Image (spheres, rainbow, N blue to C red):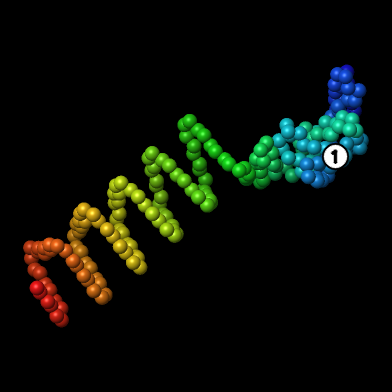
Amino acid sequence: MERIMKHNNLVPMMRPGNEQAAGLVYATVTGRAGQWYFLSAADGSVERALRADSCLVGPDCGDTVLVCRAGANVAAYVLAVLARAVPDSAELLLPGGVALHAEQGGLRIDAARIRMNATGEVAIGAPRVAVEGVIGDMAFDRMNVSIRETQARLGIVRTVAQQVTSTVERLVQKARTSFRWTEDIDETRAGRVRMQVEEQVHITAQHASLLAKGHVRIDGEKIDLG
């Protein structure tokens, strides 16, 4: 049995063996308490309903929704949101407590875990990118980085590398205390080397050689040799 109803009732559907028909009705959301949505229908046929799993857009106050209602002892369900009271915002509800919030052109994803898998490429482009977290892990076979300017504030840094090669136009380092251990060879090649120490320089070696092609000058108030 199928007939078109006027006003708010759309298409009553009769289940085999059930004397009560399931009908569709337009309604307006007036409030919410827990999982129940309070509704206002023109014919007063439905006062509250649950959200059906197929209704991914979460209803909000003032929204026009499509409701499936049956008998008095059967819960009504909101099947779809037909018109939003606030057109530029919506909440997409997915099973498992996952939600997508869209508001004024922005998108926020709420989930316990998010994973993106791509067989080709994943690209992110934006004038500003912000990443926050407690623990971060990155693993790449090869990584290319191009940055015009970097400002970093680090607490503790531990680096383990097999080989490091750096090409720097100008290098300025400032440290309160510096220690360096080299097991094999430590070689410096420079056009000029200048060392300025405020207090004391101490050099200890099994063998030491000082070679100069030109002039060697040693100046001090007291010089001890041998």
Q: In this view, does 16 lie above or below 106?
A: above
Q: Is residue 102 left or right of residue 138?
A: right
Q: In this view, does 177 lie above or below 74?
A: below
Q: In this view, does 95 lie to the left or right of 45?
A: left
Q: Residue at x 9, y 64 (%)?
A: 212
The amino acid on which the numbered mark 1 sits, given as a three-letter code, is: Arg
> Horizontal and vertical percent for residue 36?
81, 41
Residue at the farthest bottom position: 221
Q: Quadrant of the N terminus?
A: top right
The quadrant in which residue 157 appears is bottom left
> Horizontal and vertical percent for residue 59?
76, 40
As helix, strand or loop, the secondary structure at mark 1 comes to strand
Count of picture labels: 1
> Horizontal and vertical percent for residue 125?
50, 43
Q: Is residue 170 left or right of residue 118?
A: left
Q: Residue at x 25, y 72 (%)?
A: 197
The quadrant in which residue 92 appears is top right
Name the residue nearer the viewer: 80 or 133: 133
Q: Residue at x 85, y 39 (%)?
A: 48
The quadrant in which residue 85 appears is top right
Q: In this view, does 223 lie above or below 147?
A: below
Name the residue nearer the viewer: 89 or 36: 36
Q: Residue at x 67, y 36 (%)?
A: 95
> Horizontal and vertical percent for residue 149?
41, 54
Q: Name the residue under label 1.
A: 48
